Every structure is written in structure tokens, then in C-alpha cells.
Amino acid sequence: MTASSQRLDRWLWCARFFKSRAQATRFCASGRLRVNGTRTAKAHFSIRTGDVLTFPLGHRVYVIRVDAIAARRGPASEARILYESLEAADTRSAAAGASARDL
């Protein structure tokens, strides 16, 4: 049986955006995350495939589409197939270049 939805904090943890589920829960509660353009401050918010998440993390703003619901927290290669980045390629390369220059 496959799940059609999953808690937001658990998905973020399984997709390896956070090292612990407690960190993901605190981030969700901070209210800095948007699901399909709507701000949410609830870690138990249910997300489904096709939802678009927008959130700042470090010096970067992530815009990603949920491609799959996580069955477990696996290796990074498995976590990467859970989502697709919707950021423009030139934005990512400009950000990478800026961070390299700052060193």
C-alpha cells in the first residue's frame, strides 16, 4: 500500500533538507515555508505529489515540486528522486558563482 500524502516535516527530513526530524518540525512551525503559494506553520500539514514548496534555507531559497512520497529516509541518491528543483538554471549557477567568490 502506498501513501498518497505525508506530513510536511517528515517529508522534508526524508528528502534530506534537515538532519533531524525535530529540526524539520521547528522549521515548519516558524512559518517560513509555503506550500502551493500558501504560508503554513504546521508540521502536520499533509503534502501530496505535485505540491510546490518554497522555503529559505541558509543563503538559498528553494522552489521544489514534490515528485514522490517518501517510504523511508534513505541515502541521498534515493532522497533526490523525491523532488525536482523548479529554480531557473541561471539562478542556480549565479548563486554558485557568488558563493565561490565569497570564499
Image: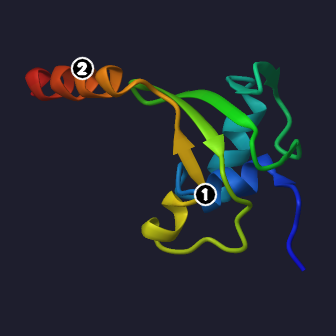
Where's residue 32, x and y in %?
68, 23
| Cα–Cα gap, marks 2 and 1 | 25 Å
Q: How is the image coloured?
A: rainbow
Q: What label does residue 46 carry, if any?
A: none
Where's residue 21, x and y in %?
67, 57
Residue 99 versus residue 84 in the image, above or below: above
Residue 14 versus residue 12 in the image, above or below: below
Binning the other alpha carbons within 10 Å of mark 2 as few (below 14), some (14 to 19) or many (20 upward) gives few
- Which residue is identified by label 2? 94
The kind of residue tagged 1 is: Leu
The residue that appears at 9% across and 28% down in the rendered structure is 103
- The foreground one among 6 and 9 is 6
Quadrant showing the N terminus: bottom right
Circle 2 SS class: helix
Residue 56 versus residue 85 in the image, above or below: above
- The foreground one among 24 and 82 is 82
Instruction: Give left or right: position of 86 versus 39.
Output: left
Q: Quadrant of residue 94?
A: top left
Binning the other alpha carbons within 10 Å of mark 1 as few (below 14), some (14 to 19) or many (20 upward) gives many
Compare marks 2 and 1 and give the one earlier in the sequence: 1
Badge 2 vs badge 1, beta-carbon distance below 8 Å: no
Q: What label does residue 82 carry, if any?
A: 1
Q: Quadrant of residue 50?
A: top right
The residue that appears at 9% across and 22% down in the rendered structure is 101
**Number of numbered discs:** 2
Where's residue 57, x and y in %?
49, 31
The kind of residue tagged 2 is: Ala
Where's residue 59, x and y in %?
38, 24
Instruction: Give left or right: position of 99 versus 13.
Output: left
Circle 1 SS class: loop
